[in-house]
Amino acid sequence: MKKLSELQDFFYEQIYPHIGYLEEERLKISSFLRTLGISLFILSIVAFLFLKEYMVDLNSLFVLLAVPVGIFMLVYSYQVKTFQRSFKDEVIQKLVSFVSPKLFYSKDSSISRLEYDSSFLFPSSIDKFNGDDLIKGEIDGVSIKFSELHTQKKKKSSKGQTYYVNVFKGLLFIADFNKHFKGRTIVMPDKSERLIGGFSHFFQSLSGHGELIKLDNPEFEREFVVYGSDQIEARYILSHSLMQNILELKKLIKEDISLSFSGSKIYLAVHKTSSSFEPRIYKKVDSFDEIKLYFQTISLVVEVVKILNLDIKIWSKK
């Protein structure tokens, strides 16, 4: 992986001289949005005080007051997304090439729905599938790709109102494992083990991921629960060294992770609550510390290949 000293040189030579206009644009947009928000808020208060004297129907009053909120959200979304697209073209594109010239970036592309389903990490059906920021290419001879994804499932409240809940939000990473698996093996974060300890085995067995597989590694089983369609193959894949490497990867990422081994691929889902490549409109974009965070996320692909030894051909692809 590139060193921070190399990144710092690259930042001041190739990025900083070209993003001054982006910081100026960010300041203009944030100032405009702040002014617009305050103006619409004051207008809403005045309208509420005026209209409540003449309108008996409070529901109609609140619907009218929702109009300024809708206007602000539309303007905010357009302004921020336009700015983010410019930032990605100027910064993220360059950072990807800096990490490796064999990696390619597409801000409007993502892991496909078919690839998402092929991971078998998310048994729940979904009604919304969105993604962007696809990075793909080759690291040390290993074909890899990853992107941000956000999938949701539709539900209805007791009052019949429709709402959506997240199934997955984060990064989905796919790499060649140099082995064709007959079955599938799934490694999930063991949240029940952390909460209720020994009683967790009952709840683990109710999962829709397949048969529960027990492994002889207490440290690993405190963090993860494993399911699969083939007990022998699962134990063959999850050697002691690979389990230790997965634990090391989790410590590095500092987020919940899920993995699966299916077909001839390894799938890694990094569960996140926020987007990885969208700059915040109220935060400076021309600081080295901010750029370093994007660099570290992109460099994750290199670390996954190295830590999990995906570049070592330990199995034949049969």
Image (cartoon, rainbow, N blue to C red):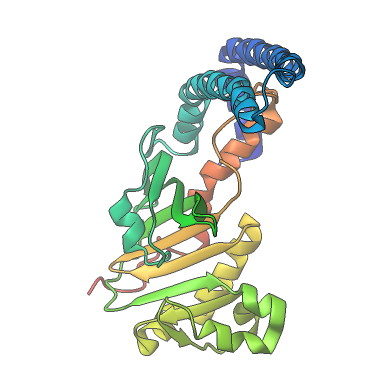
Residue for point 28% across, 68% down: 263
| Viewer-nearest residue: 176 or 118 | 118
Residue 302 visible at all: no
Residue for point 60% across, 81% down: 221
| Residue 72 position (above or below residue 187) | above
Query: In which image quadrant can residue 209 be found?
Result: bottom left
| Residue 181 position (above or below residue 277) | below
Q: Is residue 21 left or right of residue 148?
A: right
Q: Position of residue 312 (x, y in %)?
A: 40, 65
Residue for point 32% across, 51% down: 113
Q: Position of residue 91 (x, y in %)?
A: 52, 25
| Residue 85 position (above or below residue 147) | above
Q: Position of residue 295 (x, y in %)?
A: 57, 38
Query: In which image quadrant can residue 181 be found?
Result: bottom left
Q: Is residue 37 left or right of residue 14?
A: right
Residue for point 70% across, 17% down: 54
| Viewer-nearest residue: 265 or 102 | 265
Picture quarter with the C terminus: bottom left
| Viewer-nearest residue: 308 or 92 | 92
| Residue 38 position (above or below residue 265) | above
Count of numbered labels shown in the rendering: 0
| Viewer-nearest residue: 295 or 228 | 228
Residue 71 visible at all: yes
Q: Is residue 20 left or right of residue 227?
A: right
Q: Position of residue 247 (x, y in %)?
A: 60, 69
